[in-house]
Image (cartoon, coloured by chain):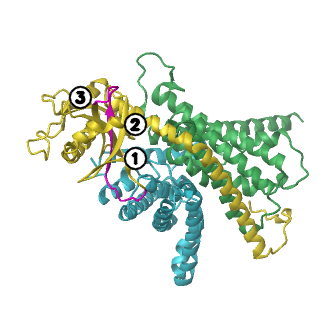
């Protein structure tokens, strides 16, 4: 590119600053217009896609759920997400309550995260207040080794751990009776243990650790609001 | 270690998810400026410095953009502001310390359009880090970049003396080396767990 | 490079083919390596990335070519970057609208098209000096060349690393996939191998040409 044949560009040798500002301003206007146009067109489609993806994840971890309501759970309150106005005061975890056709609370989907082999493994799990256990899990984000670590998403034996993983709270409702732990492949003896995938112990442990951290902190907060959660589908809002 | 802790973020950006060897960001300078150890060191330092500056800038811009609900302008703003910030820094260094300018100066404009810089800004936004975490992330990424480019330069200096088949000279050989380095860095995976 | 500076040179097949073969951005010019290595762990990702880059390349160099006489040369780089960033943002939203899964797989690399040197290089070296038609043809060639290179890498990596092509299994039952090919080191190795192949082909061609010359010299 060193050939400086700039005489090709039919501009004056030294353009005034006004010309430069005019050009930059013009370009900025064109680009602003294009970006906003595309943004406006695609926004509803993207929101819809996101909603479907989230809904699929929630319905996957809460069996029999057909509708959901989003809540924000903070240390002292539980607020419906659609009741939050624009002031960004509400800080807390997003949780999703799933209901079946007749409006009964089937479970609550919560997020968990822990560092795995490569990067943070984020999961969404379903907690059923009826059996006080975890009833399903799906991986939201992971960059684990293909063929080894990513089996946490597909391995049926591993996923069977989460059909009814014990997450009972102790009598004062402050912590789990038995913390969730991950054990070596084939040594699972108790319902609160997770049988690791052989060859992917670190990733399996990350899943277990994330679940344990999340349940230990969120469930004690959550149980205080169970009656609110179970009645929240009355409005018939999907 | 908690996934949000500063030490985890630093180690993760530096070694486990090394920007060059695991995320493939900044390959151009990694292959182009790794012929000599000395130049590689200067390039690494300059990159780390620009990473720090642009990480801070990106954090500030993102704060503003979110405040005004203008997230769709994020990319344009990032690239424009990072480019001008680097230009400013370059001019300041030139005025304040000519010696430092001589070591870093020629690399600064090159680095501006390096994908590691923009990548850092985008990733820290994606991961929703706070200010301290952003600092740790950018320092980790910078250290990781220095580490990778120094290792590469050391290997290539030695290889200059070795006899290799005609066909494999140049970029192909560098890529194979990078592959081996990347393979060895995979051994660090699981460090945070 | 001298040829393309003259406005008068007509559009030839070479204007188009150059980007695909003799000036292939990846295999010959070694430009834009980051996405080449990062998103080629499957054919779908590779092709999507290639098409996205081609779209940005085509649109931005067309716009630069249209506006080339209005842009003062002092602010040209800033202008190019803004134009490119605009189209990248558009692509980013379009891909999100088409498939969230694809968007997740490509990650931040869609937005990183902005700093792909191929695009800025085309704007600076070609689009700012040539008329619209020529720019479009040349950029299309470059884009296709880039996509082709990504496909070469993605194909090999998915085939060996996962035993599939476009998601369909192609190998016999019991084939043990080489997981390393999908992992980062595999990217370096496969690209290195392709470069080896290309430089071997080039050397062989050169040697053949020399032998031919020698024969000619001998015959006379």
Does any portion of residue C50 appear in the rendered image?
Answer: yes
How many discs appear?
3
Query: Could you tell me which secondary element the residue under label 2 belongs to?
Result: loop
Residue A39 x, y percent position in the rendering: 60, 48
Name the residue carrying label 1.
A82
* Colour for chain B in the figure: cyan
**Horizontal and vertical percent position of residue B74:** 55, 57
- In the rendered image of the structure, the colour used to display chain C is green
**Disc 1 and disc 2 on one polypeptide chain:** yes
- Chain letter of disc 2 in the image: A
Q: Which comes sooner in the sequence, label 1 or label 2?
A: 1
Residue drawn at (47%, 52%) of the image: B20
User: Which residue is denoted by mark 3 in the rendering?
Assistant: A161
**Which portion, as a residue range, is magenta?**
A86-104
Would you say residue C28 is visible in this rendering?
A: no
Quadrant the C terminus of chain C occupies: top right
Cα separation between marks 3 and 1: 34 Å
Residue highlighted by disc 2: A237
* Quarter of the figure with residue B78: bottom right
Given contact means CB atoms under 8 Å apart, are the residues at marks 1 and 2 in contact? yes
Q: Secondary structure at mark 3?
A: helix
């Amino acid at each position: 590119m060193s050939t400086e044949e700039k005489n090709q560009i039919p501009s004056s040798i030294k353009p005034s600053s006004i010309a430069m500002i005019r050009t930059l301003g013009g370009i900025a206007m064109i680009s602003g217009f294009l970006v906003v146009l595309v943004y406006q067109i695609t926004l509803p489609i993207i929101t819809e896609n996101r909603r479907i993806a989230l809904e699929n994840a929630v319905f996957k971890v809460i069996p029999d759920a057909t509708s959901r309501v989003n809540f924000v759970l903070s240390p002292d309150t539980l607020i419906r997400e659609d009741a939050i106005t624009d002031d960004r005061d509400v800080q807390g975890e997003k949780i999703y309550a799933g209901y079946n056709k007749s409006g009964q609370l089937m479970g609550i989907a919560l997020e968990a995260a822990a560092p795995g082999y490569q990067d943070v493994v984020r999961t969404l799990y379903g907690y059923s207040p009826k059996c006080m256990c975890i009833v399903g899990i799906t991986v939201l984000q992971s960059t684990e080794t293909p063929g080894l670590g990513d089996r946490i998403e597909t391995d049926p034996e591993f996923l069977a751990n989460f059909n009814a993983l014990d997450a009972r709270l102790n009598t004062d409702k402050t912590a789990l009776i038995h913390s969730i732990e991950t054990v070596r492949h084939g040594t699972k003896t108790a319902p609160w243990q997770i049988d690791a995938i052989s060859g992917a112990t670190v990733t399996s442990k990350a899943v277990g650790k994330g679940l344990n951290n999340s349940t230990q902190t969120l469930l004690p907060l959550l149980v205080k609001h169970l009656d609110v959660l179970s009645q929240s589908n009355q409005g018939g809002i999907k | 270690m908690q996934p949000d802790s500063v030490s985890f973020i630093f180690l993760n950006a530096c070694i486990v998810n090394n920007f060059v060897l695991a995320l493939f960001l900044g390959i151009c300078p990694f292959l182009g400026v790794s012929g000599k150890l000395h130049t590689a060191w200067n390039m690494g330092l300059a990159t780390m410095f620009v990473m720090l500056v642009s990480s801070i800038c990106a954090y500030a811009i993102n704060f503003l953009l979110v405040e005004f609900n203008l997230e769709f302008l994020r990319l344009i703003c990032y690239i424009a502001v990072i480019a001008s910030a680097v230009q400013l820094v370059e001019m300041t260094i030139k005025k304040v310390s000519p010696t430092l300018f001589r070591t870093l100066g020629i690399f600064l404009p090159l680095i501006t359009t390096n994908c590691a810089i923009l990548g850092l800004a985008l990733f820290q936004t994606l991961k929703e880090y706070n200010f301290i975490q952003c600092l740790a992330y950018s320092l980790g990424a910078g250290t990781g970049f220095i580490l990778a480019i120094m290792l590469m330069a050391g290997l290539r200096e030695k290889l200059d003396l070795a006899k290799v088949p005609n066909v494999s000279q140049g970029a192909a050989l560098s890529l194979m080396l990078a592959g081996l380095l990347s393979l060895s860095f995979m051994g660090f995976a699981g460090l945070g767990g | 490079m001298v040829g393309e500076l003259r406005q008068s040179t007509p559009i030839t097949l070479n204007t188009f083919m150059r980007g695909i073969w003799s000036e292939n951005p990846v295999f010959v010019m070694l430009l834009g390596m980051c996405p080449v290595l990062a998103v080629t762990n499957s054919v779908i990702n590779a092709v999507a990335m290639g098409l996205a880059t081609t779209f940005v390349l085509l649109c931005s160099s067309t716009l630069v070519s249209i506006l080339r006489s209005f842009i003062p040369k002092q602010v040209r780089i800033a202008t190019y970057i803004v134009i490119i960033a605009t189209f990248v943002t558009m692509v980013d939203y379009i891909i999100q609208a088409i498939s969230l899964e694809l968007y997740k797989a490509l990650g931040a690399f869609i937005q990183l098209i902005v700093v792909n040197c191929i695009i800025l290089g085309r704007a600076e070296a070609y689009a700012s000096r040539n008329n619209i038609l020529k720019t479009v043809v040349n950029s299309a060639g470059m884009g296709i060349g880039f996509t082709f290179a990504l496909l070469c890498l993605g194909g090999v990596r998915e085939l060996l690393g996962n035993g599939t092509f476009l998601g369909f299994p192609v190998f016999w039952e019991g084939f043990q996939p080489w997981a390393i090919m999908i992992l980062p080191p595999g990217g370096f190795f496969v690209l290195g191998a392709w470069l080896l192949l290309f430089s071997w082909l080039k050397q062989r061609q050169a040697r053949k040409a020399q032998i031919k010359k020698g024969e000619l010299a001998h015959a006379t």
